[in-house]
Every structure is written in structure tokens, then in C-alpha cells.
Amino acid sequence: MSPPLPPLASLQNKTFLQVVPEMATGGVERTTLEVASAIVEAGGRALVFSAGGRLVPDLEALGAKHLHGEANSKNPWTVFVSNAGKLAQIIEQEKVDLVHARSRAPAWSALIAARRTKTPFVTTYHGIYNAKSSLKRWYNSVMARGDRVIANSGYTRDHVLAEHKVNPDKIEVIYRGVDVAAFDPKAVTVKRREELAAQWGIALESPRPRAILPARLTAWKGHRVMLEALGHLKRDGREIDCLMVGDPQGRDTYRAELGQDIRRLGLEGHVHLVGHCHDMPAAFSLADFAVTPSTEPEAFGRTAAEAQAMGLPVIASDLGGARETVEDRVTGFLSPAGDGKALADCMGRLLALSPAERAAMGLAGAARVRERFTTRALQSATVSLYQRLIEP
């Protein structure tokens, strides 16, 4: 039985509005759910303005209220006029005490509305936004214009300071969180593992080492780097199975190209493109280790932390927030980004360890997550920040 969670600061009778493009799937949406849950638990009202999506029922089940609008639009009129006016109206009608924006286009709408109504405004800098022009840098700067700016890692904090030259006192690092009660190997039943394996058409126990790459199907997540690495290992006589778990999100061409690469490299029957998964703890329990081979910096790298919570060693790209979530040679390995041969070498080194050494690496990762990267830590820090900003 899990120990009781530490209590949250009180938000009694206060109302908080989070603004996100949509409630579909991903780290931003999941953090929105976690914070909404914390607001309700702390006695406040949780509102979310978005274009909707598959997670709206989950949000409403927490006791939060969803307000539908074109929050995913990048049309200048919608962003700077229509949505700004709608959000100002919501703030006044719902007596909102604080607005929290999590993405650039709706953040501009929220900033205008918050300033118009003199409401405290918070942003979370969830990603590392590239800026190749002064216009793009200005567009990105809205995420650094909050009364407080939450950075989801030390790497993100350093990026915000370098890119936007804001007062360091405005920035607060609050790591993304892992639900360590859910991502616990002891909590995953044999039935859940069997059902997922049957759904994916794979054996419950693989005769070969099995890796998992948990990421939506988009090029920078490094699926092709992983395939290249698996090809190198196969040519050296080492075969590894791999579960690529993630939603294509409409990128059917990219998925088809991955299928072509799998056939070209002779990896049929070894690499499984299984799509979106509703039970990631069970998915991790079917693997021996995880790989997150992103070719661009992750702002944090939540899936690496989730895998570690499940006791898996993790091989991650040596850049961005992964340097904070994965401790090289202690909880896994850091590998040069975009280098399939180097990744193959890292997998070879991991598999050369004894079972006891790999287990110790997994246990070290689980302990690190429980010490630093829990959902409760994220909730507690966010609620405390809200409380400080609305105090008279």
C-alpha cells in the first residue's frame, strides 16, 4: 500500500484557468490534467480552455470544467482578437484568480486577457522553441512574459535566460512529474501484460532482449536512428526486438517510411510499430530497457523518467533535459544524438552487463525518479506558486 501523499497548500474558493491548444495526448495535456487534479484537491476550481480532444472526459472526471474554443488556432485575428476577448469574458464571468498558459498561440490570447482584467499570469515553458528570425523570437517570447515562468528543467531555464534575457527571479524550475504509484512494476498485473501483448501480437516474454522506444511518430524523436542502430547490431550477429510505441498523429507518410526502413534492414518480426498505448506501465513491463534517441533536445524527457520508474535502464541522447533525467552509467547511458553506430555500441554495453548489474541500474533509476521527478512534487510546487501569486 502506498504511503499517503503530502498535503497541498490551500486554494480554497479560488478559480484557476489553464489555457492549452487541445486536450489530445502528450506531455502538455497530461501536466494540465495533473495540475487540474491538484487544484480541485486543494479546494479550488479548475477550468481549462482548449479546442477539446480525447482527454476532455478525463479532465471532467477530475471535477474540472472544460471550456471549448479555438485555442489551437494560429490565425492572427483569432489569437489576438477573438480568443483574447473570449478569455477576458471567461475571466470576468468565472471570477478567475489566475491564468496559466502552456503553449504559444493561446498564450498570446491569455496574456492579452490577463492584462486587460489585471489577473495574475503564469506560463510554463514546455518545449525548446527554435527561433531563426526576430519575428519568431518575438512570437516565442510570450512564454517568458508571465508574472512567473515555470521551466520544466534546468536546461529549459538556461534556454529561457539565454533566449529572452528575463529576470532570473521570475523563473521557477518545476520538473515534469511521474505518477510513481501507476509507474510501479508491482502495480502491473500479469493480466494487463497478457492483454497488451495479445493486442500487439507479440510474445509475453521475448527470446531476445527487447527494447522500447516510447515516443509519438515524428522524425526528431529518433526512430530512424534506432533502426540504424538495430541494423548495425544485426549485422554483428546480435538481434534485439523493439517496440515503437507512439501515436502517428496523422503522420502516415512517416510511419510508412519507417516500415520501408524496417524491411530494408531485415528487421521484420523484430520491430513492432504498435501505435498509441493507453497502458504505458504495462508497455514498459514488456521490455528489458528503454531508448529515447531524440535528435533534438528534449526540454525534460518524461518517458525516460517513466521508464526508469518502472525499473528499466534507459539509453538517451546526450543533450537537453535527458542529461538531468538519466545519470550516465548509473541509471543508463547517454549516447551522442543522431549517431546510430554509437547507439548500437551503447546497447551492446548495456547488454554486456550481467543481469544483476542491469537490475541495479534499473533500481538506481527508480530511486532517482522517486526522489526528484514525481507528479506530487510537480503538483505541490505548482499549487504553492499559485498561492504566492494570489495572496493579497
Image (tube, grey):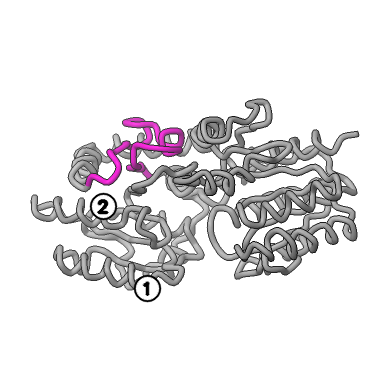
Q: Residue at x 45, y 49 (%)?
A: 303
Q: Nearer the viewer, residue 38 or 87?
A: 87
Up the image or down, 185 lies above or below 382; here it is below
Look at the image and give the residue range highlighted in magenta: 312-339
The residue labelled by disc 1 is 252
Distance between the alpha carbons at the discs numbered 1 and 2: 19 Å
Q: Residue at x 83, y 40 (%)?
A: 10
In the displayed structure, does residue 82 sit left or right of residue 267?
right
Name the mark on residue 139: none
- Please tell me whether mark 2 sits on a helix, a strand or a loop: helix
First in sequence: mark 1 vs mark 2: 2
Most distant residue in the left direction:
236
Q: Nearer the viewer, residue 268 or 202?
A: 268
Most distant residue in the front direction:
134
Q: Give x and y (percent) for residue 204.
A: 33, 64
Q: Nearer the viewer, residue 371 or 13?
A: 13
Label 2 Cα neighbours within 10 Å, binned few <14 / some 14-19 / many ≥20: many
The residue labelled by disc 2 is 225
Q: Quadrant of the C terminus?
A: top right
Q: Residue at x 69, y 65 (%)?
A: 78
In the displayed structure, does residue 177 sit left or right of residue 276?
right
Q: Give x and y (percent) for residue 91.
A: 84, 56
Q: Residue at x 49, y 50 (%)?
A: 186
Label 1 Cα neighbours within 10 Å, binned few <14 / some 14-19 / many ≥20: few
Q: Give x and y (percent) for residue 266.
A: 14, 65
